[in-house]
Each structure stands twice: as C-alpha cells, then as structure tokens.
Image (spheres, grey):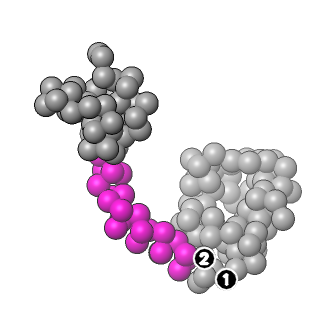
C-alpha cells in the first residue's frame, strides 16, 4: 500500500469516528484538497498535516501512527514501542543535546555558523600540532571535512 493510501485511510477513519465531514476540516484545508488526500491523489506538507490533524481534534503524530498502522499492518502499540526504542537510542546517543544545539532563539541555527564552529575547532587542533587524521578522529569529523577546513 502506498504512503498516500495509508494516510488517506487514516484520515477517513478519524473523520468517521468523530463524525466530521470533509467541509468540517475547512479551517485547515478546503474540501477539494481533503478529497484529494482521501483519494490518495495528493501529499501534504508537515505544516498542513498539523493543521488538518488539529482541525480533526487529534495530535498530528496520532494521524501518522494510524497511517503507519495501515501501511505496515502492525498495531499502534507495536509502532509506538518501536518509536519509544528509537527515541531512547536517540537520547542515549546524545541526540537531545544535538537537537537543542540546532535551535537558537526559536530558529534553526544557520549552517554557516556551524561551519564556522567546525573551522575554529579544526584550526585549534592544527595549532596544537595534530595531523589532519588525528584532528578528524579527535573531532569525530570526516577526514575530507578536516582537509577542507585545514588551510583556511
């Protein structure tokens, strides 16, 4: 089953149990767009998913889980257990620290500032007498990245 079809089925089911018509989602999307979604003929952005789910009175993640249930044949409980395991692994790998470092003052940090930080730490390694290979290992960066930043 296509991803579109899974989402279509999930959205139809949510509307059915909540007694909503396509027009009831009008604050989020026009009826024609909802029809195309439920026919598996359209995709939507993450922002539109959020708007439609909220207009239907559910969390957008719930709509995604229901779509995954349809696409995989797994139960919602199994999918949520898998998500929990992935989030636990993400946390233990330092993912939340990495995630928070990507946002500053409510906006995503620009890639240019990340590159500047990498440049500074590579130059600091160079100043201490490390080789490019040692710097790459020490900083956990690709050797090609270190090489690109080495002579700046």
Q: Quadrant of the C terminus?
A: top left
- Tag 1 near tag 2, CB within 8 Å: yes
Residue position marked by numbered label 1 in the rendering: 75
Q: Is residue 7 magenta?
A: no
Residue at position x 62%, y 70% in the image: 65
Residue 106 % position (x, y):
32, 42
Residue at position x 43%, y 30% in the image: 144
Question: Mark 1 Cα within 10 Å, few/some/many (few <14, many 20+)?
Answer: some
Residue position marked by numbered label 2 in the rendering: 79
User: From this viewpoint, is residue 112 visible?
Assistant: no
Range of magenta residues: 80-101
Residue 115 % position (x, y):
34, 28
Q: Is residue 90 magenta?
A: yes
Q: Quadrant of the N terminus?
A: bottom right
In the depicted structure, whether residue 13 falls above or below residue 143: below
On screen, residue 60 versus residue 37, left or right, reads: left
In the depicted structure, whether residue 12 falls above or below residue 115: below
Which residue sits furthest left? 128
Residue at position x 41%, y 63% in the image: 90
User: From this viewpoint, is residue 59 visible?
Assistant: yes
Which structural element holds mark 2? Answer: helix
């Amino acid at each position: 089953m296509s991803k579109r079809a899974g989402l279509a089925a999930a959205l139809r089911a949510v509307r059915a149990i909540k007694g909503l018509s396509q027009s009831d989602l009008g604050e989020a999307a026009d009826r024609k767009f909802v029809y195309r979604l439920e026919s598996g003929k359209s995709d939507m952005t993450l922002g539109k998913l959020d708007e439609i789910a909220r207009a239907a009175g559910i969390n957008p993640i719930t709509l995604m889980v229901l779509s995954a249930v349809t696409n995989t044949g797994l139960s919602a409980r199994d999918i949520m257990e898998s998500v929990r395991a992935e989030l636990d692994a993400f946390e233990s790998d330092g993912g939340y620290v990495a995630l928070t470092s990507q946002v500053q003052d409510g906006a995503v940090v620009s890639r240019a500032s990340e590159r500047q930080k990498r440049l500074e730490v590579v130059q600091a390694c160079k100043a201490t007498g490390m080789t490019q290979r040692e710097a790459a290992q020490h900083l956990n960066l690709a050797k090609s990245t270190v090489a690109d930043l080495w002579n700046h």
